[in-house]
């Protein structure tokens, strides 16, 4: 496609203040469809707030968000999801009294815009892909934390996103599980989805990401190729503490 | 043996439900007028419970003003049947229509508020409707008015026949309410509502249009509440602002019933309303005590299991009594037939 390198997501001067606390301040960021952008940052750097702003859960105090060339700054969360922005939550928010299958079905029907019949097939496929098939009939509230994180990913995938926001989904995985997760992410990306991935597992980011950005104090501190960013002395200072 | 008992419990619940339906269907032959009157009250309160549960249990609209639409239905029915001379049977659906129309401006006010403010707001709106009803000429003002004999006789010339007709209308209304609400919850909108019940923010983030779902639920309940109001009027043979718009009878008891039975489920309101009538039958001699028992019971239930008695039972039962949930399609088995391509790697 001709617009492969045109920004999928453009954030300009984005701010979110909680009282006097400037969690996100004058942040600029652009993400192309061809990218897997990893976001690093110390705790409290504003990473999850950034996702809540992009997904429309929080309203910004200032600035603008454009998605696929259109201003979505004032769009409600569900409209952004319908437009193709899928997200996971760092702290899982399952529909606890619904089955695992239904959790994914909600996303396929509402976010993905499929009819129930079609959505059922899609949901079953997504469960296979994320390794949750064996748990399909269990109430989501009874899952372990790891499976809840898988469910977060499964629901976000069922939306059929063109922009996927992943918030710390690799923590606590074994080497093999992390490999499976990376396969899924690379596969989704190959299908034409731009990905922004907040993660503390640096090795996972290094293996999957085409670009890394470091968030510090509510703004982008460093942005570039993963190895270059990780080698940046400022990054080492704020993030690795050396 | 342990794994058999849940399915036995399920069987017992199914039998109880089927038995209840059978009794309701055969009631005109089983009960006298007095019994039918109690069952009519049960069915109308069941309709109110199902509607309050849809609003509070799924759409997070904790309304304390649903008696407004019962009263509006009652007054509209009287207006059409007694004042405008419309066929009394046709006046019933017209009452539903008026309740629906009244819901639109009420919604505009109510939807600007959330949580506790919404509860207070719905109550205020309901009180305003009640006071307006007391100002209407032709409706007996503050003290109300009786239904003309001709209107009552349209539903049966002798009292016994009339009780049967009113009972059958209430049974039809309850059946339509239950089945349509079940279909709503099974639909794509219902999947979104059930998700909202469990986690509103996540539902919104996954594409569920929360505002639209709320509006739909609010407008959905109004005509059913109006129909219940018309049937209550037929049974009581009179309208009056305090009785037709009774917050105690049409909202407070209903909230108790839903909370005790199990909010956010389809079975809970049925169980809660049935229990309410059993308690009332056995403890009504005790007067106020039966209300005190009801209040204590609701507090105990909330402390032990926020999802009510049905939530307690549901811990033992393997599934829903009235299945609302969606199961994975059989086609998923076909995908599983080729596991090596999709199965996750076993943990190292």
Image (spheres, coloured by chain):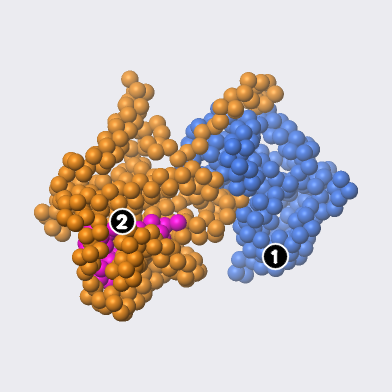
Chain colours: A blue, B orange
Alpha carbons under labels 1 and 2: distance apart: 46 Å
Q: Could you tell me which residue is drawn at 49 percent across and 43 percent down?
A: B186
Quarter of the image for residue A127 reads top right
Mark 1 residue crowding within 10 angstroms, few (<14) / some (14–19) / many (20+): many
Closer mark to the observer between disc 1 and disc 2: 2
Q: Quarter of the image containing the N terminus of chain B?
A: top left
Q: Quadrant of the C terminus of chain B?
A: top right
For the residue pair B36 and A124, the one nearer the viewer reads as B36
The one of A191 and B40 positioned closer to us in this rendering: B40
The 10 Å Cα crowd at callout 2, few under 14, some 14 to 19, many 20 or more, is many
Q: Position of residue B101 (x, y in %)?
A: 45, 66
Q: Residue at x 67, y 55 (%)?
A: A80
Residue A34 in which image quadrant: top right
Residue of label 2: B254
Which of the two residues, B213 or A233, is positioned nearer the viewer here?
B213
**B8 w.r.t. B165: above or below:** above
Give the residues drawn in magenta, as a range: B220-248
Indicate yes or no whether the magenta region holds residue B243.
Answer: yes
Indicate left or right for B23 with B98 as reference.
Answer: left
- Element type where label 1 sits in the image: strand
Checking the image for residue A231, the label placed there is none
Residues at marks 1 and 2 on the same chain: no
Q: Nearer the viewer, residue A52 or A20?
A: A52
Q: Is residue B114 above or below residue A98?
A: below
Q: Which residue is mark 1?
A: A15
Overall secondary structure of the magenta section: helix
Q: Position of residue B331 (x, y in %)?
A: 60, 27
At 56% from the left edge and 50% from the top edge, which residue is drawn? B203
Badge 1 vs badge 2, beta-carbon distance below 8 Å: no
Q: In this figure, what is the number of numbered marks?
A: 2
């Amino acid at each position: 496609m001709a617009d492969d390198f045109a920004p999928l997501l453009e954030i300009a001067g984005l701010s979110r203040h909680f009282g006097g606390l400037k969690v996100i301040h004058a942040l600029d960021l652009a993400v192309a469809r061809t990218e897997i952008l990893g976001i690093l940052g110390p705790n409290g750097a504003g990473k999850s707030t950034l996702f809540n702003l992009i997904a429309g859960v929080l309203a910004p105090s200032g600035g603008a968000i454009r998605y696929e060339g259109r201003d979505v700054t004032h769009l409600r969360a569900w409209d952004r999801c319908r437009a193709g922005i899928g997200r996971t939550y760092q702290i899982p928010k399952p529909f606890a009294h619904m089955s695992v299958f239904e959790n994914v079905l909600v996303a396929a029907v509402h976010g993905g815009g499929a009819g129930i019949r079609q959505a059922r097939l899609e949901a079953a496929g997504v469960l296979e892909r994320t390794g949750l098939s064996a748990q399909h009939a269990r109430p989501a509230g009874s899952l372990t934390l790891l499976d809840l994180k898988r469910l977060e990913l499964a629901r976000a995938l069922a939306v059929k996103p063109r922009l996927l926001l992943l918030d710390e989904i690799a923590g606590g995985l074994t080497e093999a599980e992390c490999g499976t997760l990376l396969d899924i992410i690379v596969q989704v990306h190959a299908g034409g989805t731009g990905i922004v991935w907040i993660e503390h597992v640096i090795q996972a980011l290094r293996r999957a990401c085409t670009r890394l950005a470091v968030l510090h104090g509510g703004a982008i501190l460093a942005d570039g190729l993963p190895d270059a960013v990780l080698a940046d002395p400022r990054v080492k200072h704020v993030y690795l503490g050396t | 043996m342990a794994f058999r008992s849940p399915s036995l419990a399920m069987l017992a619940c199914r039998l109880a439900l089927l038995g209840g339906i059978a009794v309701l269907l055969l009631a005109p032959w089983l009960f006298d007028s007095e019994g039918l009157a109690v069952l009519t009250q049960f069915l109308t309160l069941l309709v109110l419970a199902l509607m309050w549960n849809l609003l509070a249990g799924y759409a997070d609209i904790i309304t304390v003003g649903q008696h407004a639409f019962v009263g509006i239905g009652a007054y509209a029915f009287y207006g059409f049947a007694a004042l405008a001379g419309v066929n009394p049977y046709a006046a019933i659906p017209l009452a539903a229509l008026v309740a629906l129309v009244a819901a639109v401006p009420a919604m505009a006010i109510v939807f600007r508020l959330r949580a506790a403010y919404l509860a207070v707001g719905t109550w205020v709106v309901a009180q305003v409707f009640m006071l307006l009803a007391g100002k209407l000429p032709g409706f007996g003002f503050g003290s109300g008015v009786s239904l003309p004999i001709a209107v009552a006789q349209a539903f049966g010339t002798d009292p016994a026949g009339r009780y049967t007709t009113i009972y059958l209308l209430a049974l039809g209304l309850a059946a339509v309410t239950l089945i349509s609400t079940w279909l709503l919850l099974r639909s794509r909108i219902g999947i979104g509502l059930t998700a909202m019940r469990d986690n509103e923010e996540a539902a919104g983030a996954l594409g569920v249009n929360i505002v639209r779902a709320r509006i739909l639920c609010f407008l959905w309940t109004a005509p059913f509440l109006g129909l219940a109001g018309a049937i209550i009027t037929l049974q009581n043979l009179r309208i009056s602002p305090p009785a037709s718009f009774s917050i105690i009878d049409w909202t407070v008891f209903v909230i108790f019933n839903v909370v005790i039975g199990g909010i956010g489920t389809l079975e809970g309101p049925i169980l809660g309303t049935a229990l309410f009538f059993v308690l009332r039958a056995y403890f009504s001699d005790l007067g106020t005590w039966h209300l005190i028992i009801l209040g204590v019971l609701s507090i105990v239930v909330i402390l032990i299991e926020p999802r009510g008695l049905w939530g307690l039972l549901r811990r033992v039962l393997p599934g829903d009594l009235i299945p609302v949930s969606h199961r994975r399609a059989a086609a998923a088995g076909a995908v599983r037939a080729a596991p090596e391509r999709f199965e996750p790697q076993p943990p190292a």
